Image: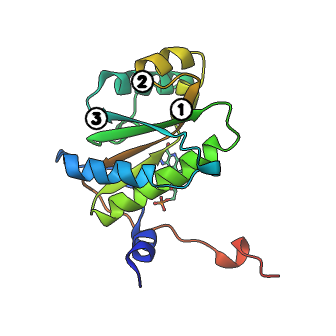
Amino acid sequence: MGEVIKAIAKRSSTRGYTAEPVTEEELRILLEAGLQAPTAANKQEIHFTVLKGNHPVLQEIEEDKNKLRGILALEHNFYYEAPVVIILSADRDFRWSVLDAGIAVENMSLAAEELGLGSLIIGCIYDALRGEKQEYYSKALQLPDNYEYEIAIAVGHKAVSKEPHTYDAAAQITYL
Ligand SMILES: Cc1cc2nc3c(=O)[nH]c(=O)nc-3n(C[C@H](O)[C@H](O)[C@H](O)COP(=O)(O)O)c2cc1C
């Protein structure tokens, strides 16, 4: 079996990380995997904002996310204390932005798996980043003009392990 197919089969969401940092080389490979993803009409509109896990804006997003959900604080923050969080944003007026971001983030997730790292795709901050404070966060995260958050990914060394999810192929596939 090829390496890509193996990584797809092995990947699962990591919700617990060690303090070991992601190296510059690992980060470069992850970002390249995102940049190498296909985009509609080869628009290459996805922007990648890289934050270290201790960046104060992440704490602010966590607090806003919790406030919007009416919860005080959780045992883990939304990125499970991963050493790196990458926020993918895209042109709000391009029809395929969300799909392109999804493809890029999965490329990164598979690259992380191949590097022996864990990753978590993060959508739960959508309301915080696309709500009333959208313009504030766009500035804080230095998003390009007219860009908005699409998805994020946390990456780091796995402190926990989880089996890949199961699925019901018969229910999800129709052969005509
Ligand atoms: C678009 C998207 C958004 C997600 N957002 C979150 C999230 O905010 N927090 C989280 O813990 N997991 C999130 N996940 C991970 C899913 O819960 C996970 O992929 C799913 O439960 C299947 O498990 P697996 O990734 O281990 O195969 C997200 C996944 C996707 C594709």
The image quarter in which residue 13 lies: bottom left
Circles 3, 1 touching at the beta carbon (< 8 Å): no
Circle on res. 149: 1
Disc 2 is placed on an element classified as loop
- Chain-order first, disc 3 or disc 1: 3
| Distance CA(mark 2)–CA(mark 1) | 10 Å
| Relative horizontal placement of residue 71, taking residue 60 as reference (left or right) | right
Labels 2 and 1 touching (C-beta < 8 A): yes
Report the Cα–Cα distance between label 2 and label 3. 14 Å
- Disc 3 CB within 8 Å of nearest ligand 1 atom: no
Establish if 173 lies above or below 42.
below
Q: Which residue is mark 2?
A: 141
Instruction: Tell me what residue is drawn at x 24 percent, y 53 percent.
Output: 157
Residue 63 in percent (x, y) is at 42, 22
Nearer the viewer's eye, disc 3 or disc 1?
1
Under tag 3, what secondary structure?
Answer: loop
Q: Which mark is residue 53?
A: 3
Query: Whole-percent x and y of residue 146?
Result: 59, 23
Q: Residues within 10 Å of mark 2 (few under 14, many from 20)?
A: some
Front-most of residues 176 and 173: 176
Q: Quadrant of residue 4?
A: bottom left
Q: Position of residue 108 (x, y in %)?
A: 41, 54
The disc labelled 1 sits on which kind of residue? Tyr
Pointer 2 or 1: first along the chain: 2
| Numbered label tally | 3
State the residue lying farthest toward the right: 176
Instruction: Characterize the local packing of mark 1: few (<14), some (14-19) or many (20 or more) Cα atoms within 10 angstroms.
Output: many
Label 3, label 1: how far apart the Cα atoms are: 18 Å
Does residue 61 sit above or below 95 in this rendering? above
| Kind of residue sitting beneath label 3 | Gly
